[in-house]
């Protein structure tokens, strides 16, 4: 009997060994075969187009980068909050006003969370909004031209982080404050933070046709940190949800002092109710000072207007408008599923993921089941609003996205992985490592009622050994996964620029069809534009000299200029007369203290030059425009300040 | 581009041109006063196109060649030129020409590109319109257009994205040029 058992065990062991051996070889073979499949999945043949656009925030570069998926190729860096010498953005006379704020001209920004405009809960590809965290601002980029066309400063905000997410019909782009501050700002002791500082949640209306932004109202909330936010959709349309941390209201050593409470809150804001209150004259106008910068695509020029007041709303003045949903341990991401029923709170320091139910929340409100209040705002019972818990899915949950097929994908910073789980059953169905320490993740169609599935990409904070080393400073890395099957499959690593926080992505077709190729000359209303040789001229106004110049392959008109003096302020107003796709011209003059200009067909841009030295100085086209690009040059003569060299200009003949 | 530049610098003619420019700058930097224009030098300077009638037919510069049957390559396959010039259309054409074409073309002289005066004595109306509307393909596929590009130093005919109506109006304007 013993022998039988023994031999059975032996046989079994051998069998198991064989089986596992077989398994190994089989999976090895599979991964070999898979590897080539994977290459095919991300391969976009030369000249072919990617299926998706991805707009990845540039973080501390202040900009927004445009990528194609699945190839991971970068197509463009769109300057938003930072000067960009490549195109002259923030350097040219036309674009300097874009970077104006109540603190003066600011050459840099920290861009975070891009979000694409929506119609009826679906991504419509008209505009993309992005927030600046440091000096609170929201920018709008027109996806017809891929240019930043509007930036609005957000007063009373500080650390504009829970931004810039749009509602189902782009009624609002919402901007919450990460840091609470004294409102209005005043000189007061920092230690008196508690009970005195406030957090502003700003609802910026977006005009349906033009997309023009306007701060409709700000809700002045208790002095917590409002970390991230998302709109309700479908059944929860009309609500907005914000995670909070530091409900302890600490002003120092937050890594300890803001981790004391077992639960912080998700603030649920019924913005429709507040909108109605405001439309009926509710709220108060308080003095403020903020910049509203608008780029006009006909004059090719931005203007900056300072606005002196803003409407604020005290939430306790609007009963039923704001509630707190207790959520464990300093929640970071605040994500709403495509149906609008589930609100996921990713407690950074919690072992579990918390999911609230919108239906249960309404029910608890209806029955006034409150656990208490914070500064007059009702707190609901955790158990009453809880839909479910994903038990111990990983360490350090940050953000969740949805595939529209009943699955959620959450990133875990500490355990460096993406975990896929099922809405409703809360079971974990797959997990894949990321390399390394993932922050946000994006599924095309992300913040909408209709995610577009197929791919998911994770944006990692740490790169280390993923690419060839480039010294101590590395670009961040992103990883693309195929999510069309049951299991996520890692397809591709690609480097990203700056520090991407969130990204927005969508199918390419809508944007591609509308993408503009040139600016029509006949629509050019720039006050210094020149269209023909009759318009080209050099005009002196005191010590200002305005040069009305044109470019076409391959000359400047005029290309010989005299009569400029040391101490003059010389404005080169350059109009590109080309009307063909992808024929920009550049402009640079020796000793220019700003950047070059890169002028698109039909566009006019201006650069100021204040010559300090007598001489004859060359200017030239910086963009290799044609076979005769090297011939595209000119001279400007600078005479001494006390000289009386007359103003003259010419092209194609000796200057007389 | 670096290679291109290097190549160009190795071109004897360009080196000389550059030296002329440098020499001129040197002279000019002596002071702000009007300086007497010094004669430069000339080395193998290209004669103007009007200069000589070459005996062989194929050596005739493309701008002087006559080909009234070639319609060129592009959207225009037939143009009905009326007996009389449509003055309204020609006026509109003159306006379009002024806005979109004078950066490189002058009615009365060769400029960056050839003068349009008398163009219909040398080209078919279809060819002219195709050259306006479809220059990129024309210089690749039409032998005459290709030769013109070379004759005019590789300076490309820019596609100014004119509508067919505007291009037709420009053609009408060309008929008025004598």
Image (tube, grey):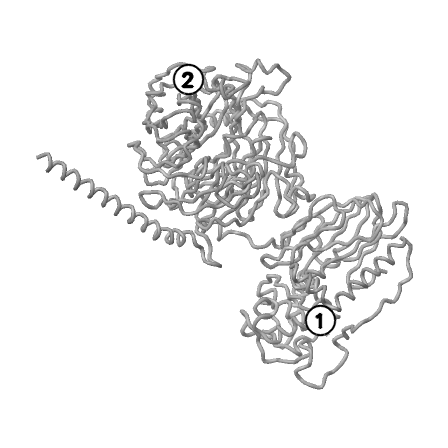
Relative image position of residue B161 (x, y in whole percent): 59, 61
Answer yes or no: is residue A140 visible. no
Q: Which mark is residue A263?
A: none
Q: How many marks?
A: 2
Q: Is residue A211 above or below residue B37?
A: above
Q: Quadrant of the N terminus of chain A?
A: top left
Looking at the rendered structure, the secondary structure element under dot 1 is: loop
Classify 10 Å Cα crowding around label 2: few (below 14), some (14-19), many (20 and above): many
Identify the residue under disc 2: A378
Q: Nearer the viewer, residue A13 or A581?
A: A13
Mark 2 → mark 1, Cα distance in angstroms: 81 Å
To which quarter of the image does residue B121 belong? bottom right
Kindly indicate whether the residue at mark 1 contacts the one at mark 2 (C-beta within 8 angstroms). Answer: no
Q: Position of residue A407 (x, y in %)?
A: 33, 38
Residue A371, percent from left and from top: 37, 15
Check disc 1 and report the residue beneath it. Answer: B115
Residue A134 seen: yes
- Residue at horizontal 61 percent and vertical 14 percent from the top: A189
């Amino acid at each position: 009997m013993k022998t039988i058992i023994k031999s059975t065990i032996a046989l079994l062991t051998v069998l198991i060994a064989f089986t596992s051996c077989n398994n190994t070889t089989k999976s090895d073979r599979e991964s070999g075969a898979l590897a080539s499949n994977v290459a095919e999945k991300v391969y976009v043949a030369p000249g072919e187009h990617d299926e998706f656009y991805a707009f990845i925030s540039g973080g501390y570069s202040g900009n927004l980068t445009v990528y194609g998926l699945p190839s991971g190729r970068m197509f463009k860096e769109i300057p938003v909050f930072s000067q960009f010498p490549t195109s002259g953005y923030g350097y040219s006379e036309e674009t300097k006003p874009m970077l104006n704020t109540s603190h003066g001209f600011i050459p840099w920004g920290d861009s975070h969370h891009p979000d694409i405009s929506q119609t009826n809960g679906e991504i419509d590809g008209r505009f993309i909004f992005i927030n600046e965290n440091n000096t609170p601002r929201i920018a709008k980029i027109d996806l017809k031209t891929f240019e930043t066309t509007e930036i609005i400063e957000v007063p009373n905000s500080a650390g504009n982080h829970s931004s810039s997410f749009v509602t189902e019909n782009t009624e609002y782009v919402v901007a919450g404050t990460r840091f609470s501050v004294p409102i209005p700002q005043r000189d007061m002791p920092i230690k008196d933070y508690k009970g005195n500082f406030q957090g502003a949640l700003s609802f910026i209306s977006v005009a349906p046709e033009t997309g023009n932004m306007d701060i409709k109202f700000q809700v002045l909330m208790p002095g917590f940190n409002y970390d991230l936010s998302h709109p309700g959709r479908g059944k929860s349309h009309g609500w907005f949800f914000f995670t909070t941390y530091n409900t302890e209201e600490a002003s120092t050593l937050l890594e300890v002092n803001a981790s004391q409470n077992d639960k912080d809150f998700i603030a649920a804001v019924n913005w429709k109710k507040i909108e109605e209150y405001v439309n009926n004259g509710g709220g108060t106008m308080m003095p403020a000072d903020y910049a509203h910068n608008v780029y006009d695509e006909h004059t090719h020029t931005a203007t900056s207007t300072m606005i002196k007041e803003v409407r604020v709303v005290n939430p306790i003045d609007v009963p039923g408008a704001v509630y707190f949903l207790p959520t464990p341990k300093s929640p970071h991401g605040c994500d709403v599923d495509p149906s609008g029923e589930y609100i996921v709170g990713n407690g950074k320091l919690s072992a579990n993921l918390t999911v609230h139910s919108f239906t249960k929340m309404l029910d608890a409100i209806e029955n006034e089941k409150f656990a208490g209040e914070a500064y007059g705002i009702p707190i609901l019972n955790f158990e009453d609003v809880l839909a479910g818990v994903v038990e111990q899915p990983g360490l350090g949950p940050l953000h969740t996205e949805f595939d529209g097929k009943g699955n959620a994908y959450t990133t875990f910073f500490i355990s460096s992985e993406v975990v896929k789980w099922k809405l409703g059953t809360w079971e974990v169905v797959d997990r894949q490592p990321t390399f390394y320490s993932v922050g946000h993740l994006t599924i095309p169609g992300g913040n909408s009622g209709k995610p577009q599935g197929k791919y998911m990409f994770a944006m990692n904070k740490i790169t280390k050994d993923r690419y060839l080393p480039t010294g101590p400073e590395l670009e961040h890395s992103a990883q693309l996964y195929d999510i069309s099957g049951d299991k996520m499959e890692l397809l591709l690593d690609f480097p990203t620029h700056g520090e991407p926080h969130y990204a927005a992505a969508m199918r390419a077709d809508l944007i591609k069809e509308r993408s503009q190729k040139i600016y029509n000359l006949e629509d050019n209303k720039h006050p210094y534009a020149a269209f023909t040789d009759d318009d080209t001229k050099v005009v002196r106004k005191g010590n200002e000299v305005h040069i009305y110049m044109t470019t076409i392959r391959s000359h400047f008109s005029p290309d010989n200029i005299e009569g400029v003096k040391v101490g003059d302020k010389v404005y080169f107003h350059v109009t590109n007369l080309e009307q063909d796709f992808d024929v920009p011209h550049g402009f640079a003059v020796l000793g220019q203290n700003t950047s070059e200009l890169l002028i698109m067909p039909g566009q006019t841009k201006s650069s100021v030059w204040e010559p300090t030295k007598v001489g004859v100085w060359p200017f030239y086209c910086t963009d290799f425009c044609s076979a005769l690009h090297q011939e595209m040059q000119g001279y400007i003569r600078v005479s001494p300040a006390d000289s009386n060299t007359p103003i003259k200009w010419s092209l194609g003949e000796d200057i007389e | 581009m670096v290679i291109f530049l290097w190549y160009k610098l190795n071109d004897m003619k360009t080196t000389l041109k550059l030296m002329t420019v440098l020499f001129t700058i040197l002279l000019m930097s002596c002071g702000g006063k009007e300086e007497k224009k010094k004669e430069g030098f000339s080395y193998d300077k290209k004669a103007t196109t009007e200069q000589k009638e070459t005996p062989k037919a194929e050596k005739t510069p493309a701008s002087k060649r006559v080909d009234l049957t070639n319609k060129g390559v592009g959207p225009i396959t037939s143009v009905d030129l009326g007996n009389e010039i449509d003055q309204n259309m020609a006026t509109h054409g003159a306006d379009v020409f002024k806005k979109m074409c004078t950066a490189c073309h002058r009615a009365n002289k060769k400029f960056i590109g050839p003068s349009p005066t008398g163009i219909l004595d040398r080209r078919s109306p279809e060819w002219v319109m195709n050259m306006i509307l479809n220059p990129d393909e024309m210089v690749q596929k039409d032998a005459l257009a290709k030769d013109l590009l070379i004759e005019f130093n590789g300076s490309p005919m820019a596609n100014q994205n004119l509508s067919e109506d505007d291009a037709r109006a420009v053609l009408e304007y060309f008929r008025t040029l004598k």
